[in-house]
Amino acid sequence: MKNASKARRHGIDPSPIDIPALCREYRCTYAELRTILGPDPDRADPDRIREYFDKKEETRMSGIQGGLSQARIANLIQFVDAHLGKGLQVPQMAAQVSLSAFHFSRAFAASFGTPPHRYLTARRIEEAKRLLATTDTPIAEIARRVGYRTQAHFTGVFKQNTQTTPGTYRKQHRETASREAPVSATC
């Protein structure tokens, strides 16, 4: 009682600290909380506890919010471009930058603004568009080169992303290219 009235005079809440409730609120272990509270939990400062966990959360999130370093991003882009046609998957991309698939996916999304699988699909479609517009390579071969096992699967993904089939895309872009080509004068 004597300590409670003294605490009130100094503006400190004298009520005992509910350790299980704090563990739930801050998602920490009892042992971790006890080290913060010290030997006398009743004298712990609640603001100090909040400050500790706010800093801890900020530190934990800073690695995710910052995403991948510029060196890792450059390494990853080069790796993806070099392995586009080899059935590349997220775990392989994560291993390339020495992260677990889970942490890689979060850091990748923070850096690129899209999940790794969507980025990979977009890169495949962009490369396929380039090949369709500039080469006479059969569509089945283009599908294989950009990482799809079958032309049917490639066509479905291509249409879903571009609202047109690969054959139609090729035809439209060949017509556009032929109209834009300069006419040579014959003498």
Image (cartoon, helix red, strand yellow):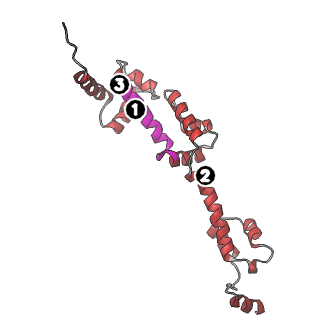
- Label 3 residue SS: helix
Q: Nearer the viewer, residue 181 or 21?
A: 181
**Distance between the Cα atoms at labels 1 and 3?**
10 Å
Residue 5 is marked as: none
Q: Quadrant of residue 25?
A: bottom right
Question: Mark 2 or 3, which is nearer the eye?
Answer: 2
Task: Look at the image and give the residue range highlighted in magenta.
Answer: 111-130
Badge 2 or badge 3: first in the primary sequence = 2
Q: Indicate left or right for 163 with 58 as reference.
A: left
**Relative to 167, 179 lies left or right:** left
| Residue at numbered disc 2 | 63
Q: Quadrant of residue 47?
A: bottom right
Would you place residue 139 above or below residue 94 in this image?
above
Relative to 154, 74 lies left or right: right
Callout 2 environment at 10 Å: few (<14), some (14 to 19), or many (20+)?
some
Query: Is residue 120 rendered magenta in the image?
Result: yes
In the picture of the structure, the residue carrying the numbered disc 3 is 132
- Which residue is drawn at the image coordinates 55% and 49% (left, top)? 106
Instruction: Give residue 69's position: percent from left, percent from top.
Output: 58, 43
The residue tagged 1 is 126
